Amino acid sequence: SQQGEEDPQALSIQEGENATMNCSYKTSINNLQWYRQNSGRGLVHLILIRSNEREKHSGRLRVTLDTSKKSSSLLITASRAADTASYFCATALSNTGNQFYFGTGTSLTVIP
Amino acid sequence: ETGVTQTPRHLVMGMTNKKSLKCEQHLGHNAMYWYKQSAKKPLELMFVYNFKEQTENNSVPSRFSPECPNSSHLFLHLHTLQPEDSALYLCASSQERGTGGLLTSGNTIYFGEGSWLTVV
């Protein structure tokens, strides 16, 4: 399959700790994006990293991309209870135009 | 509020019914998408419309029929569905560069809140 795969499937941490989620994919990409989904709601875009970038920051979010390993990581620092959600990576493949493929997501629980 | 509005938010329909899901985007985007989200599965890309033209149909059964009358509106017509079609259906849009057909920019996509569909 072409979709990204997030790891771990579920993660539970205490408030204030850092949360790290990983995403692996199979083929060349134009960019990779991370999304967040609260239970039963739509997905909200968090950050986009292009294939020629290695690291990007946005507030408490840090994303890395290693195209040689076909993997990306999302780090949420100083987590809050409100960060509890599912997190998905989406890949825009180099040869499929604007088609975005998602994984099954990482379910993050931040315990107050 | 992402600028993509889906209605209805919840829909219960029988297997012989005909219903439609509606999506409207207020972002001036030129590409729209339908995704299906089932429990424990990756989001499935169903249809892609670029500049009102369908450019992708990922082997979706014909009981799902999309319609894109203009760049701002997207419908998913439903007919004789099965219980396994029960899922969250997500509409999304993006602004892509190019002249239609296969676009390559892969920009940020904005999702609606989804329509929960239950087939009984």
Image (cartoon, coloured by chain):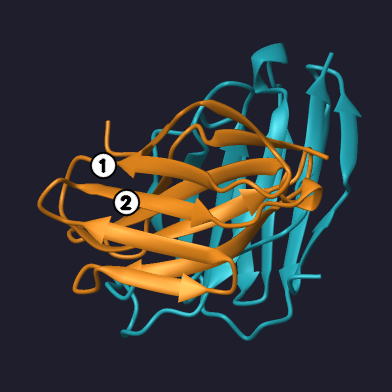
Chain colours: A orange, B cyan
Q: Is residue B104 above or below residue A95?
A: below
Query: Horizontal and vertical percent for residue B76?
Result: 67, 47
The reply, left or right, for residue B115 in relation to residue B101 is: right
Subunit that carries the residue with mark 2: A
Q: Does the residue at mark 2 contact the one at mark 1 (Cβ under 8 Å)?
A: yes
Tag 2: amino acid: Ser
Which residue matches tag 2? Answer: A72
Res. B84 image quadrant: top right
- Give the residue displayed 77% in from the left and 53% down from the top: B113
Q: Which mark is residue A91?
A: none
The residue carrying mark 1 is A25
- Which secondary structure, mark 2? strand
Q: Residues within 10 Å of mark 2 (few under 14, many from 20)?
A: many
Q: Earlier in the sequence, mark 2 or mark 1?
A: 1
User: Front-most of B92 and B60?
Assistant: B92
Do the residues indicated by labels 2 and 1 lie within the same chain of the protein?
A: yes
Identified by mark 1, the residue type is: Tyr
Horizontal side of A21 relative to B25 (left or right) equals left
In this orientation, does residue B106 appear? no
- Regarding residue A97, the answer to whether it shows in the image is yes
Of the 4 image quadrants, the one containing the N terminus of chain B is bottom right
Residue A6 in the image: x percent, y percent? 42, 36
Q: Is residue A39 left or right of residue B106?
A: right
